[in-house]
Every structure is written in C-alpha cells, then in structure tokens.
Image: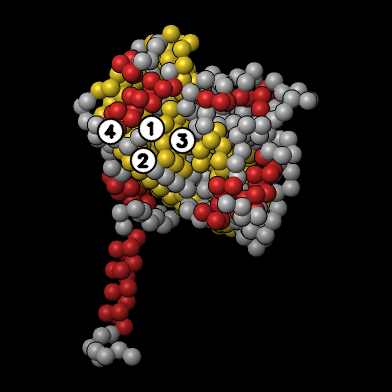
Amino acid sequence: MIANKNITFKNILFIVTISALFISCSEKTVAVSLDNGGSSWKKMHLVIKSIPETKFSDKIYNVNDFGAVADGKTLNTIAFEKAIHKCAADGGGQVLVPNGKYLTGAIHLESNVNLHLEDNAEILFSINPKDYPIVHTSWEGTEVMNYSPLIYAKNKTNVAITGKGILNGQADSTNWWIWSGGKNYGWKKGIPSQNDPTNREVLVDMAEKGVPVAERVFGDGRYLRPNFIEFFECNTVLVKDVTVINSPFWILHPIKTNNMIIDGVTVNSHGPNNDGCDPEYSQNILIKNCTFNTGDDCIAIKSGRDADGRRVAIPSKNIIVQNCKMIDGHGGVVIGSEISAGVNNVFVENCVMDSPNLDRAIRIKTNSKRGGIIEDIFVRNLEVGTVKECVLKLNMFYNVYGSQTGNFIPTIRNVSLENITVKNGGKYSVWAEGYAQSPVENITLKNVKIQKVDSLYLLKNVKNIKFIDTYVNNKKVESVK
C-alpha cells in the first residue's frame, strides 16, 4: 500500500528509470544496447575512460644485481624471483631486464611491479616442464591445477610487462607443441599427448561432475601445455610494446581480470592453439595497436567451457579492439568457443585483416554444450584483404572434439558491421546458422563492400538480417531471399 497519495505512476516510473540508469553506469560496467544513433560507440569511449592506468615508483631493480646472467644458458629463475620480491616489498617499481638473453623458468609477478625489457633484451623460457610449478590456472576454458603459465600473476593489482624486448617461449615440434597430438607438430603414434584418455577429457569430465578445482590436479604426465602470459583475478594491468614468440599454448590470457590495456604488442607464434589474446571472464579490456600472426585465432574472447563456465557465471564484457593488424589465424576477432557464461559489449574498429592463411574476419562459435548469450557486437572501419572462408561467421553448431550437442541452446543477437571493405571474402560474405527455437537475430551490414566472394551468404534460422548500402561482387544487396 502506498502511504503518500501524491505519488503518481509517472513518479514511480521516473524513479525506476533513474535507478536503472545508475546501476547500468556503475564503475565496473557500462551497459550497451544496439541502436542506429551511434550512442553505443559513445559508450565505448566511456568504457575506455573508466579503465585506470598503471602507476609505478621510479625505483629500478636490475635483475643482474640479483644474480641474473645474460648468456642464454644460465637458469635465472631465482634471480628474477628475488628482484620481483624485493621490488614489491619496497612498494613497487620497475624490474629491469637489460639487453641480453636470459633463460628462466616461470616468472610470477607481484602487485606494483613493472617487468620492463630493454630493446635488445630477450627472455628465453625453459622447455623443461619441471621449471613450471603447479598453480591454479585454466586450460581451454576449464579451471585446473596445472603447470604455471610462463608469466603468471594471481590476485595482483597495478602490474605490467613493458618494453620492446622479446619474450620467447622456445616452443616447437620437439617440445611443447608435440603434446598437442597434431601430426603437423611432430606427434606420431605412440607419443603421449593431451589427447590420451587420462588427460584432456578427464579434466572436462571432472568439471561436468563438479569436482572442486583444488582436486583437479594435473601437471606431470598429463601433457596439458601451459599458457604464456596469464593474469588471473587481477586488476589494473598493462602489457605494452613487447614481442611474444613461440608460445606453448594460448599467449595473452586475462582470466577473471578487469581493467587491462594491451598496447603495441606483437605476437608471432604459429603453434597449435596459439591464440594471440584470450580475454576470459574479464571486463574492461582494451587491445590496441597490436599485431597478431598466429597458429589459431588472433583474438578469441572466452567465458568458460560447458559446466565450468556456468559454475563461474562471469560474462566477458566491454572488450575493445582498436587499430590492430591480423595476419595468419583461424579468425581475426573471434568469440568462443569456450563461451558458456556469455559475452556482450564487444567493440572492434580500425583494424586491418589480410592473409591467405586467415580463415575469417569476424567469427562467433558456440554449440548446445556451450550455450551462452552472445550479444551486442559492434564492428566498424575494417580493411580486409583476403580471408579464406568468409567475412562474418556466426555458428551455433561448432564441433571440433567429437559430439558437441547438449541441452544448452545458445543465443546470438545484435551484431553490427559498418564501413567494411573486403577484396576477397572467400566462400561467403555471411555464414550464419542458428536453431529454429533460437535463431541468429538482428544482424546488420551497413556500407560493406566486398569485391569478390563465391556466394552471397549461407543462412539457416536467421531472423532480421539487414544489408544497408552493401555491395557484394559489385552488386547492391537489396534483400534476403
């Protein structure tokens, strides 16, 4: 019962509206809706402005002063550890890696530490699995106790990796890559790999059964390769200017991390599952001025696999990609397939994508085991040279590891491409497949020009797709038949 009779329905509606706006513009997230007025892109700029920048003390801790030897042979794990711990204990600053080659095992970062590489510095990471202790990490979207990532930070704030030096994982077909079980990477029958019955599928089964992460202990004898750079449950992170090569597995992996800037990074790594950057369960991630030349997806936005993703239930949101170059890869900017907690508010602009070894420009991949709601994806101002398969692919039937069907029907909606030029789009301009009960919805291509493509589109269970001022093979696309 309302005590004050002067309160009208309009008053109540106004209060509710203001409350909703206040919630949607909270510090952690900025809500975005698909529209035609450009307000979504304005909100992208609000997200960028909301991301705090890292700040460090001027104090410098040279790893050579802690016993590091730049001969490319001496194992410097302890020297790096001492320098990082001293820097953190003193309130933070820069841990300096001078010019030269430094061999090390896992590097674990601390809050308020900037690991800085001089221009001609190269960190060579050991290929001995024993140099990577077991930590709480994630593997293909499933949390696990496994080999430490080569560079790892957990529950840290204000942390960075900077400088124009090289981070070299030294992975090739004689060590980490052979664990993939791929014949192209040195594997032959009789060699153990991640595909053995006691390895990858056991981990997935543990997650399905709800086994606590602390009891999912892998590592030695399980052949699950470590990620390269992982920030786990961190806040206010910067990775700037470094070059990353020869990764065992995923390369840049922010997981459950908020407020991260990846700027001017070059990734050149053509191994199996060598995704360039995989934001997972993460928010407010800005990826700009980077170059990706990879053996898998250039950028792949994730939110957990199957039951594990639904357990964590943190969608990735406010992911921004600007002024990047994508060369080889399965996709330029990809969402999925480990996507069970959903993804929303993705912005991609001013990127160049071009290689005969780049399969797609923009891709969303999920299935009825993954589920998830993927919505509000905005792409503009792309220059696409050549892609093999298609410009835009939206697939609810992704299937790469055998049967991938279940009871979790996904949702894909609100995808906009604007101001895109393509020289060779491969097989299709748009390839979109949904379910009858959950069609792919609200797809807009505006001012898209594709000079050459085999077929206009392949559409199955798609609702409300619009072509506005869009030309394919020099013909204006008037409507969808």
The disc, 3 or 1, on the residue closer to the chain's N-terminal end is: 1
Quadrant of residue 209 in the image? bottom right
How busy is the neighbourhood of tag 3: few (under 14 within 10 Å), some, or many (20 plus)? many
Task: Measure how far apart labels 3 and 2 are at the Cα level.
Answer: 11 Å
Q: Is residue 127 left or right of residue 11?
A: right
Disc 4 secondary structure class: helix
Q: Residue at x 46, y 43 (%)?
A: 255
Task: Measure how far apart labels 3 and 4 are at the Cα level.
Answer: 22 Å
Q: Which residue is mark 2?
A: 156
Q: Residue at x 64, y 58 (%)?
A: 408
What amino acid type is highlighted by mark number 3?
Answer: Glu
Tag on residue 89? 4
Let me know if residue 378 appears in the view. Answer: no
The disc, 3 or 2, on the residue closer to the chain's N-terminal end is: 2
Residue 201, given in percent of the width and then of the height, sits at: 69, 43
How busy is the neighbourhood of tag 1: few (under 14 within 10 Å), some, or many (20 plus)? many
Let me know if residue 137 appears in the view. Answer: yes
Residue 131, given in percent of the width and then of the height, sits at: 52, 25
Task: Measure how far apart labels 2 and 1 are at the Cα level.
Answer: 8 Å
What amino acid type is highlighted by mark number 1?
Answer: Leu
Task: Measure how far apart labels 3 and 1 are at the Cα level.
Answer: 10 Å
Judging depth in this view, the residue of 466 and 47 nearest the camera is: 47
Task: Measure how far apart labels 2 and 4 are at the Cα level.
Answer: 14 Å
Residues at marks 4 and 1 touching, judged by CB atoms closer than 8 Å: no
Q: Nearer the viewer, mark 4 or mark 1?
A: 4
Residue 137, given in percent of the width and then of the height, sits at: 52, 40
Judging depth in this view, the residue of 477 and 88 nearest the camera is: 88
Farthest left residue in view = 58
Q: Which residue is mark 3?
A: 230
Judging depth in this view, the residue of 286 and 328 nearest the camera is: 286
Q: Nearer the viewer, mark 3 or mark 4?
A: 4
What amino acid type is highlighted by mark number 2?
Answer: Lys
